[in-house]
Amino acid sequence: MFLDTSRYAQVAQDDTTDAQGRPVKALRLRRLPYVIGDPHAVTDHDRLDVLAQASHADGTRFWHIADANTALDARELVAVPGDTLTLPRT
């Protein structure tokens, strides 16, 4: 259902039904691991995929940065120049 690189690839799923009684799959809550990282001062036009490419040689790992900063909306992490976010080391 998810790509191997997705943050949801290893999350358990449950079978349930929607409001109309149709069968659907639902993801269980995903626990965020503790992450060691380094501070990064946000600059104008920063993007998480570009930061992930620069730090991990894989732009699809942008969600690791979002998880390290417990962001539900990753765009908010780079919205304000001068803010600081954590770039995970691994």
Image (tube, grey):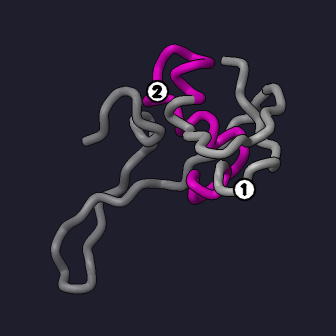
Q: Is residue 71 left or right of residue 29?
A: right
Q: Is residue 73 left or right of residue 58?
A: right
- Cα separation between marks 1 and 2: 21 Å
Question: Which corner quadrant holds the N terminus?
Answer: top left
Question: Dot 2 lies on which element?
Answer: helix
Residue at 56% x, 27% y: name it.
52
Q: Residue 80 bears which disc, if any?
A: 1
Compared to 19, does 15 lie above or below?
above
Residue placed most toward the observer, 46 or 66 = 46
Residue stretch in magenta = 51-77
Identify the residue under disc 2. 59
Residue 10 colored in magenta in the image: no
Residue 15 location, x and y as percent?
29, 59
Residue at 43% x, 30% y: name it.
60
Residue at the outermost top position: 57
Q: Is residue 4 left or right of residue 90?
A: left
Residue at 43% x, 42% y: name it.
8
